[in-house]
Image (tube, rainbow, N blue to C red):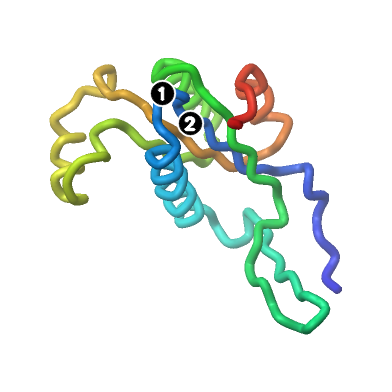
Amino acid sequence: MTQLPDENQKRYIAVLSKKMDIGRSFNVLGHLSVALSNKLDSTATQYVDYIDADGSCHPNMSHYPFIVLKGDNSNKIRKVREEALNRGITFTDFTNTMIEGGSLAQQQRTRETAEADLEYLGICLFGDTQTLREFTKKFSLYK
């Protein structure tokens, strides 16, 4: 068995707006997760296979925790984004301009909207646990 790093040294954190219904929240979380995983260098994170007693493989699960938190509003998520930018933390975010229509229409709508006018629906980050906690500890777990 391969020696793995301490699983508590890094983590994924998603902050989702509490103003969304559960279906939209799952959709936003899915987009954020796929986008963030695409941004990460393969040496930055760690994935493991789980083998059950019958020998079936349950592949490529993250070794690091994935925590989902709840944000009160767009501005609180915007502040998390600003901290991530200032600290050089890998992240991806999802805004209200990314909801209706296809990807091309969403990109156009985003281009036509000033950052200050965007409503942030979620953000997903990956990094050092202690650093992320410094500016996400005020959020509660998404339940």
Q: Whole-percent x and y of residue 119?
A: 31, 24
Residue 113's label in the rendered image is: none
Disc 2 residue type?
Leu
Q: Is residue 5 above or below residue 73?
A: below
Q: Secondary structure at mark 1?
A: loop
In the picture, residue 121 is in which quadrant? top left
Residue at 14 percent across and 45 percent down: it is 105
Residue at 48 percent across and 31 percent down: it is 16
Q: CA gap, disc 1 to disc 2?
A: 9 Å
Mark 2 and mark 1 in contact (Cβ < 8 Å)?
A: no
In the picture, residue 142 is in which quadrant? top right
Disc tally is: 2
Q: Nearer the viewer, residue 88 or 103?
A: 103
Disc 1 residue type?
Lys
**Disc 2 target residue:** 16
Please state if 83 lies on the left or on the right of 138 as rendered. left
Q: Residues within 10 Å of mark 2 (few under 14, many from 20)?
A: many
Q: Whole-percent x and y of residue 102?
A: 18, 50
Q: Residues within 10 Å of mark 1 (few under 14, many from 20)?
A: some
Residue lying farthest bottom?
Answer: 55
Q: Nearer the viewer, residue 120 or 129?
A: 120
Residue at 45 percent across and 37 percent down: it is 22
**Disc 1 target residue:** 19
Q: Whole-percent x and y of residue 137?
A: 67, 21
Q: Secondary structure at mark 2?
A: strand
In the picture, residue 99 is in which quadrant? top left
Residue at 50 percent across and 24 percent down: it is 80
